[in-house]
Amino acid sequence: MDRTRSRKAFERSIKTFAGGVGSAGRLFPEPLFIDRGKGSRVIDIDGNEYIDYVIAFGPLILGHCPEVVMDAVSEQLGKGTMFGASHELEFLVSEKVAQLVPCIDLVRFTCSGSEAIHFALRLARAYTGRPKVIKFEGHYHGWYDNVYVSVKPSPPVGLPNAPWKVRGAPGQPENVVDNLVIVPWNDLEAVESALEDQGHEIAAVIAEPVMFNNGGIGPEEGYLSALREVTSRHGVVLIFDEIVTGFRLALGGAQEYFGVTPDLCVFGKGLAAGYPISGFGGRREIMELVATNQVAHFGTFNSNPLCLAAALATLEELSRDDGQVMQYVSAVGAKLRTGLNELFGRHGFPMRADGCDSIFVLNSPVLELRNYRDFMGVDAEFVYRFYEKMFNEGVWFMRRGNMMLSAAHTEEDVQQTLEAAERVIKSW
Ligand code: PMP
């Protein structure tokens, strides 16, 4: 594939645009500049077309340029983009979110996932009067100082049952780690013993219900309900980070999918099909602190009408006909994941797609994956080589093997992807 124009664009971009990318997550070794997207496909500025399994890192749950959302946003554009005052879309979307998401009685909207998490942690601390938060090694909850710790640490990282607290970036104050307790994922004993030792100081346990950012490692059978039980017992707020899983694993997110209701949750990507909005919500008793302004929550761009118009249209589309569209996203994802695993197995290719339905990760070699330490055994170089070959076949996913599907992905996309994967495996 010729990517001359992308390369030239990159050379130009880096002169004024730091690193030539808008987010560190977009630093792919091969510069890629997209011209446009339609449905499940993107076309780069050289005219190459790709089946898109990046879908903007998750938000494009309806694919590129879904008409229902474009119409709603266009209509709102003519009425105004921001008012700095209340408007009807706020309660229309809140009602829908509260109806769909089990833990939510009250909700507020924000602009990014990191921001929503930042506030949810403040709220949990205010509610409990305690300073510390239990976070799982390898889980990502945004890039803010207070929680960007032990996300993708490289060795040395300490003993598996006593992980070091590793700040993610220079510039984070040293003392941010003081208020975090890092424990391994899928290890109930580790959480229980942290709560027994320091429970009186712990405000919250925060978790990605599926560790999508490192390996696609789900909760073991009964693990989330055990977390629910142990946090309730210690008066600790359980927060699900549903930025990826919300409005994706099910209309009610991972909490519906796994049948475990947290106290608070944050959501974002799937909510508005590509418009920058996120939110946090949960149990009335906790959220009352926001509602009554005892815990201040501000934001100029919060619940702006443009994004809420997109959110309402997205939720209506996902939930129409008893959630048929949402079910389709899961089904088409499951089809690709099982198809890939069947292919890898048939060719004895050392790779497996781990995860759930429409979100999964290609890992190699095939390992028993319970937590971040196991994921450290994944051969990132091997996955990257596979990624690169698939990219040259016109199939685009994340270089660590993460793939996400949307309502715009078709059976034909799945078929073409499987055929491309088979060609890559045969030529390996
Ligand atoms: N939590 C999770 C689980 C995420 O995957 C992400 C983003 N990839 C975030 C939080 C942060 O969201 P944002 O990039 O919108 O700040």
Image: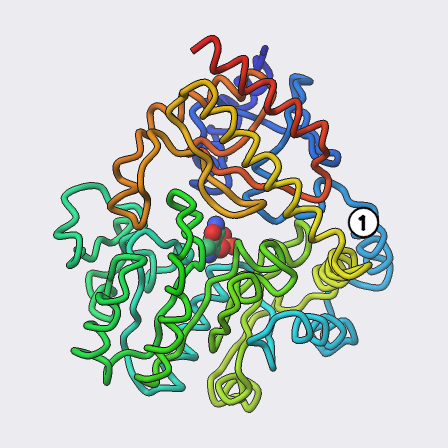
Residue drawn at 56 percent across, 70 percent down: 299
Q: How is the image coloured?
A: rainbow
Q: Position of residue 427 (x, y in %)?
A: 47, 8
Is residue 178 left or right of 133 when viewed as pictured? left
- Quarter of the image with the N terminus is top right
Q: Position of residue 402 (x, y in %)?
A: 48, 38
Q: Is residue 116 above or below residue 42?
A: below
Residue drawn at 82 percent across, 59 percent down: 321
Is residue 267 left or right of 323 when viewed as pictured? left
Q: For the residue marked with disc 1, what is the amino acid?
A: Met
Q: Is residue 91 above or below residue 44?
A: below
Query: Hey, which quadrant is residue 367 in on the image?
Result: top left
| Foreground residue among 219 and 111 | 219
User: For disc 1, does the CB lie below 8 Å from ligand 1?
Assistant: no
Q: Position of residue 251 (x, y in %)?
A: 65, 61
| Foreground residue among 297 and 241 | 241
- Quarter of the image with the C terminus is top left
| Foreground residue among 369 and 272 | 369
Query: Hey, which quadrant is residue 334 in on the image?
Result: top right
Residue drawn at 41 percent across, 70 percent down: 225
Residue drawn at 73 percent across, 77 percent down: 91
Q: Secondary structure at mark 1?
A: helix
The residue indicated by pointer 1 is 70
Q: Is residue 237 above or below residue 161?
A: below
| Foreground residue among 237 and 7 | 237
Q: Is residue 231 above or below residue 323?
A: below
Dot 1: few (<14), some (14–19), or many (≥20) neighbours within 10 Å? some
